[in-house]
Image: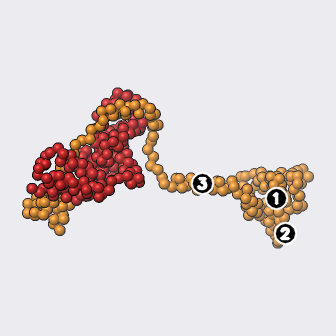
Chain colours: A orange, B red
Amino acid sequence: MKCAQVVRLFGAYWDDETTQAEREWVEAHLASCSSCHKEYEEFTRTLELVGSLPRVEPAPDLVERVLARARRSAPAADVVPVRSRPWVPVTAALALTVIAGSLALPWFGVRDDARRQTATRVTAGEPVRLGPVSENGAPALKAPAGVLPVPGHALVAAAGTANEPDSLFDHTEDVEFILDPVKVQRGRPTVARPPAVQGEKAVISF
Amino acid sequence: MARVAEDDERAFSELVRRFQGRVMNLVSRVLNDRECGDDITQEVFVRVFVHRRNYRRGSKFSTWLFTIAANLAKNEIRRRVRRRNWFSLNALQEVLKDSAIQLADPTEGKESRMEREQLQEAMGKAIATVPEKYRLALVLRDIDGLTYEEIAQVLGIPGGTVRSRINRARGMLKRKLIPLLRREGEP
């Protein structure tokens, strides 16, 4: 055990990094233990050989070659070192996937399903007009050509908060967006028949 | 270095002259390959020039320089390992055995130039068989004479790790050289 401890201190002893007490202890042990003494002799001989290796001198024309290459090299831009965060590329990849997916969904017919899921749900009561109202009380919005209007369902719904804005957003714009004529051009059914009114509630889908 | 950052070519030339020997020695000893050491030394200084404006004033230039050199040497070692273009341990043992026999031959004389060169060659190859992370610390300490603190900065590791790597590298090297050392010690 003592020999193993001394061998572990060989490096520090060689580098003169031991404490006074450690140095005296190592020296006392080396004086009394021939095995450790031999080990230390081999250790020091190894380091002497390493230290005595001749310097590898550079070729005389190295400076010229370096200068020639350096002249051809443009300086790198000043860089403020920034520690890279491993989650950034992952988050960026996820965001790109989501964006690409949302752009691709309409081309796979998911758009109509999504609209059905977000169908407007209003409670029964006073009729509410989902769009600018004309002077005679009829909805100003006209169904685009090719779209069969569904009387009493497509554009007018029953609600308890007639003509009262329930948020800061202009919902008339939303309605115009939902009645997108693109659906007609693509030949898909554009106006889904809403389910029949049950009790006091009606669900209207566009 | 401040003048180099301001595109002073003469200052850069002086810098290369001053440090080329240390860089060449470090890289060549780590790789045990003089030709490759020359190429990498050249690359080290070109990188110093290219990145001259990124050098932080106040930090020690030699530490920055050795960091670049150590990184390029590491890359080269890894490239060689990938290509498996590296001499085998058996080849090293053959060299060590031959060197030991040469040294043991009383007719040659221990101080002859040939023996010394063979011994140095064997030592160079023995160093090259020490694993990369230990080898770099060993060469920086026992050949280039950097302090433990400087090595810690160059390799970007704590001082305690530097000490332990150097100790392990020395132990490995001693074990590899034991046949040579024991024959050398024989009458």
- Do tags 3 and 1 sit on the same chain? yes
Judge left or right: residue B96 versus residue A173. left
Secondary structure at numbered mark 1: loop
- Do tags 2 and 1 sit on the same chain? yes
Rendered-image quadrant of the C terminus of chain B: bottom left
Query: Residue B67 location in percent, x, y?
Result: 34, 45
Residue A120, picture quadrant: bottom right
The disc, 3 or 1, on the residue closer to the chain's N-terminal end is: 3
Residue farthest along the bottom direction in this orientation: A199
- Nearest-to-viewer mark from 2 and 3: 3
Dot 1: chain letter? A
Note whether A177 is above or below A7 in the view shown. Answer: above
Judge left or right: residue A54 versus residue B156. left
Residue position marked by numbered label 1 in the rendering: A188
The disc, 2 or 3, on the residue closer to the chain's N-terminal end is: 3
Secondary structure at numbered mark 3: helix
Residue position marked by numbered label 3 in the rendering: A95
Residue position marked by numbered label 2 in the rendering: A196
Disc 2 packing (10 Å; few <14; some 14–19; many ≥20): few
Q: Nearer the viewer, residue B11 or B115?
A: B115
The disc, 2 or 1, on the residue closer to the chain's N-terminal end is: 1
Judge left or right: residue B45 versus residue A127. left
- Do tags 2 and 3 sit on the same chain? yes
